[in-house]
Image: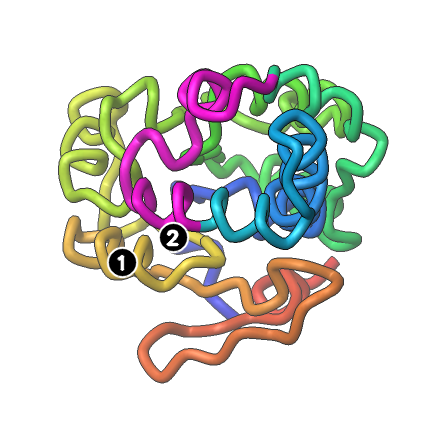
Amino acid sequence: MIAFDEIQTVFLDMDGTILDKYYDDYFWEVYVPQKYSEKEGLSFKEAQKRLFSMYKAEKGKLNWTDIDFWSLRTGLDIFKLKKELAHSISPHPDAEEFLKVITSNGKKVYLLTNAHNKVVDLKLNKTGFNQYFNDIFTSFDLGYPKEKIEFWDRLKETIPFESESAIFIDDTEDILYTAKLSGIKLPILRATSSSQSLPKKSKIFFTIMSFRELIKF
């Protein structure tokens, strides 16, 4: 158990951390290729191959999660497709209770995500989770993805917080490395990003399967 009385600020990722990443995995790996194959007259596998190559070229950049960019690249209305699958947006089963407990204990809670602002609004409206955050910061707000140290520099310029009394939970190790470099006291890996995938393992970061490993509720 972490001594939560010593923690003042909790930073949380969205996709894979408080929300089940299966929605996003299915959307980009299956649903978009289906629609792209229909539009381009390709087989599903050929559409996947072409799109996956496009995705790979933009990984770690703002374009990676920029739905307007992908609408231009694919000729598809990506946000319209996101809304078509909105019924599949689902939180992890332990997420809301965790949010309730930490907010009721007076912690400052911030959402930090690489997701596009329109997608953030869609997901938080669907789950009702926006009520739990003191503020929400996307990579588009700060001009850099979370993998870049500049994201954290901009964050420090935007809100006052003590790095030594802050924790950050994310499902991506590369992002946790950067958070640690920025001075975040305790970067934590969420092992179970998707209900349909195997848990991740880390030799570097404190890893949790459930938020119940951090605080009792």
Query: Where in the figure is residue 12, as x and y percent of width and height?
Result: 48, 43
The residue nearer to you, when weighing 192 against 186, is 192
Instruction: Determine which residue is flagged by label 1.
Output: 185
Q: Residues within 10 Å of mark 2 (few under 14, many from 20)?
A: many
Say which amino acid is labelled 1.
Lys
Which quadrant does the N terminus fall into? bottom right
On residue 167, the disc is 2
Query: Where in the figure is residue 21, as x and y percent of width and height?
Result: 64, 50
Which residue is at 59% across, 19% downward?
76
**70 versus 93 height, above or below:** above
As for residue 212 lying within the magenta part, the answer is no
Q: Residues within 10 Å of mark 1 (few under 14, many from 20)?
A: some
Which residue is at 18% across, 27% downward?
154
Q: Residue furthest bottom?
A: 203
Q: How many numbered dots are placed on residues in this image?
A: 2
Asked if the residue under mark 2 is in contact with the one under mark 1, i.e. CB atoms within 8 Å, the reply is yes
Query: Which residues are drawn in magenta?
Result: 53-76
Q: Please name the predominant secondary structure of the magenta segment in the image.
A: helix
Residue 25 lies left or right of residue 59; in this view the side is right
| Residue 162 location, quadrant | top left
